[in-house]
Image (spheres, rainbow, N blue to C red):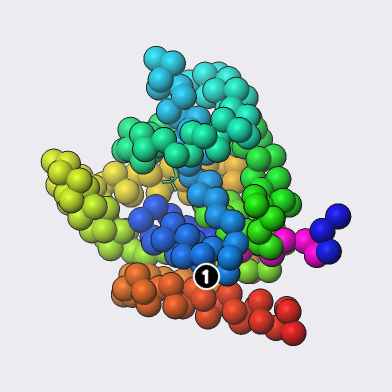
């Protein structure tokens, strides 16, 4: 038994809200381990695609999720194909399947209970960290921004990657994906009742990070007093 249980920082929010950048920087700031849980769903979606299957078919998604053990998930998380739009769309199709979520639950719970490399805490980002994976996390932040601002950020990112897209198409895609994530019956993407909402619509990345540190410190400093 460790002397004290690891400190968990739960970061949730919709895509392109800035939550990934904030979570990664928080982990570095506090010396905690970091897990981008979206990658787990992307890994399942991509595994189905690579087997020549259809991610919308729950049976294929369940089989792919069951075949991914912890070691394979960690190896896969470095695969750059997971960052593709194709993997992201496939992920949003496998994510509503209850058995898929159940398969990935243990991996995430274990990561919280025993962060890699003996880190004293962990930062996880996703959609259901504060509600399902780590409901007792002392720090919960729900990072959000208007759909227009998020679409603008994603549009710039895709343009920089040389992809031929329009802002209107990116916005439509963002709104459809938000609706899919928020309306699914199991673990819908919504803030935990005790999460602090951080709206990054009018903040630079540095300002958003500074706010997140303030929110975390307000809890962690009093906790360790
Ligand atoms: O954050 P992302 O774009 O990598 O997430 C990919 C998909 O996985 C997205 O549709 C939401 C889903 N997801 C989820 O349901 N639960 C999580 N904890 C993380 C991601």
Could you tell me which residue is drawn at 72 percent across and 61 percent down?
A: 6
Badge 1 marks a residue whose secondary structure is helix
Indicate whether residue 5 is drawn in magenta: yes
**Farthest right residue?**
1
Residue 38 horizontal side relative to residue 134, left or right:
left
Q: Quadrant of residue 219?
A: bottom right
Q: Quadrant of residue 52?
A: top left
Viewport quadrant of the N terminus: bottom right
Residue 223 horizontal side relative to residue 216, left or right:
right
Q: Quadrant of residue 146?
A: bottom left
- The spot of residue 162 in percent (x, y) is 15, 44
- The spot of residue 85 in percent (x, y) is 31, 38
- The spot of residue 197 in percent (x, y) is 50, 70
Residue situated in front as seen by the camera: 79 or 211: 79
Q: Is residue 222 above or below residue 108?
A: below
Residue 94 shows up from this direction: no
Indicate whether residue 157 is drawn in magenta: no
Could you tell me which residue is drawn at 43 percent across and 28 percent down?
A: 46
Residue 57 shows up from this direction: yes
Q: Is residue 63 above or below residue 138?
A: above
Viewport quadrant of the C terminus: bottom right
Circle 1 residue:
29
- The spot of residue 109 in percent (x, y) is 69, 47
Q: Is residue 24 above or below residue 61?
A: below
The magenta-colored residue range is: 4-9
Could you tell me which residue is drawn at 69 percent across and 39 percent down?
A: 106
Residue 155 horizontal side relative to residue 147, left or right:
left
């Amino acid at each position: 038994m460790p002397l004290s249980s690891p400190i968990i920082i739960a970061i949730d929010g919709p895509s392109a809200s800035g939550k990934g950048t904030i979570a990664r920087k928080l982990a570095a700031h506090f010396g905690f381990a970091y897990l981008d849980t979206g990658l787990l769903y992307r890994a399942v979606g991509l595994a189905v695609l690579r087997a020549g299957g259809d991610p919308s078919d729950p049976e294929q998604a369940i089989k792919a999720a069951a075949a991914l053990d912890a070691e394979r998930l960690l190896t896969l998380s470095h695969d750059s194909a997971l960052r593709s739009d194709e993997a992201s769309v496939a992920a949003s199709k496998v994510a509503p399947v209850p058995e898929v979520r159940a398969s990935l639950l243990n991996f995430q719970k274990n990561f919280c209970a025993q962060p890699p490399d003996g880190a004293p805490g962990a930062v996880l980002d996703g959609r259901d960290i504060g509600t399902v994976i780590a409901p007792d996390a002392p720090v919960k932040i729900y990072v959000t921004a208007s759909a227009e601002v998020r679409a603008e950020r994603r549009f710039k990112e895709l343009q920089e990657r040389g992809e031929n897209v329009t802002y209107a198409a990116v916005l439509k895609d963002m709104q459809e994906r938000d609706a899919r994530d928020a309306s699914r019956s199991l673990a819908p993407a919504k803030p935990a009742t005790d999460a602090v909402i951080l709206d990054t619509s009018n903040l630079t990345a540095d300002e958003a990070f500074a706010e997140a540190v303030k929110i975390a410190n307000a809890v962690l400093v009093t906790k360790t007093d």
